[in-house]
Amino acid sequence: MTVSVPGADLFYATRGRGPVCLVPSLIGTAPYERQMPSLLSDRLTLVFVDVRGGGRSTGDAADLTFDVLAEDLEAVRRDLGADRVAVLGHSIVGALALEYGRRCPASVSHVVAVGTPPSGDMQRLAVKAVPFFEEEASAERKQLLQDNVGSLPPDASAADRFLAQAPMRFCDPHVDARPLFAGSEHRPALLAHVTKSLVAAWDVTVDAASLVVPTFLALGRFDYVVPHVLWDDIVLPHTTRRMFERSGHQPFVEEPDVFTGAVTAWMGMD
């Protein structure tokens, strides 16, 4: 399905039944269609959305601001005929989900942020993430990461470097993540714009009082990309935090049943 908005045609794919939950993506919808638990789509209508400039959506990524994103997702919501929607954002896309909720509290019922950092400043995150990995990761995990990175050729692609980081992203450090990300559509211009312009100065604690939509923050115990310690000193209104003990950066993949149960119970669907 597509919906036309000023400057772009937005692609979205739908699966499931029940209340609508938008799942925006920067890497195409296919990976998240594959990774979201089937049990979750038994309870929610999952709507996977390519943001403008990404996947099968058109438009210039440079036009994407938080306001434009909110307008785009509102267009998808209206096209679906939904009065209100939940929104689920993974990793840095959780920041986009939070900002959609901030701007449209009348039409966003819930925000689910999974493995989302509290700030888009990567250097600031590394100050805690690097020592956390050194202190908490097992010797085996460290060796696997070293071996993976060391085996990369000098001209390794961004995708290959990403996959080599599996020991930092999954509870099982031996996991082969390639099948999970098959069909990814990497648009360098979009990823660069989002990480270097849109969220680089973003901080969840700025004007936190305006985050009035109920938010579920899902964190993995073995996530060394966005370690849970980043959130230790942060208190947000209307936010429920949940640690997934057998997960890394993607609890919906490693603990699908537990993740589904936790999210739907929090949404009051039991």
Image: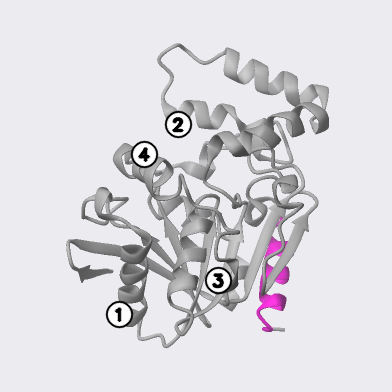
Q: Is residue 63 above or below residue 75?
A: above
N-term-proximal mark, 2 vs 4:
2
Residue for badge 2: 159
Q: Amino acid at mark 3?
A: Ser
Left or right: where does residue 158 sit relative to residue 241? left
Q: Is residue 238 above or below residue 112?
A: below
Q: Which residue is mark 3?
A: 41
- Determine crowd level at label 3: few under 14, some 14-19, many 20+ residues with C-alpha closer than 10 A: many
Dot 3 or dot 1: first in sequence order is: 3
Depth check, mark 2 against mark 4: the one in front is: 4
Q: Percent position (x, y) of residue 60?
A: 22, 51
Mark 1 / mark 2, whichever is N-terminal? 1
Circle 2 Cα neighbour tier, 10 Å, few/some/many (<14 / 14–19 / ≥20): few
Q: Nearer the viewer, residue 270 or 196?
A: 196
Looking at the image, which residue is at 40% across and 15% down? 155
**Image side of residue 41 versus residue 249, left or right:** left
Residue at 31%, 68% in the rendered image: 72
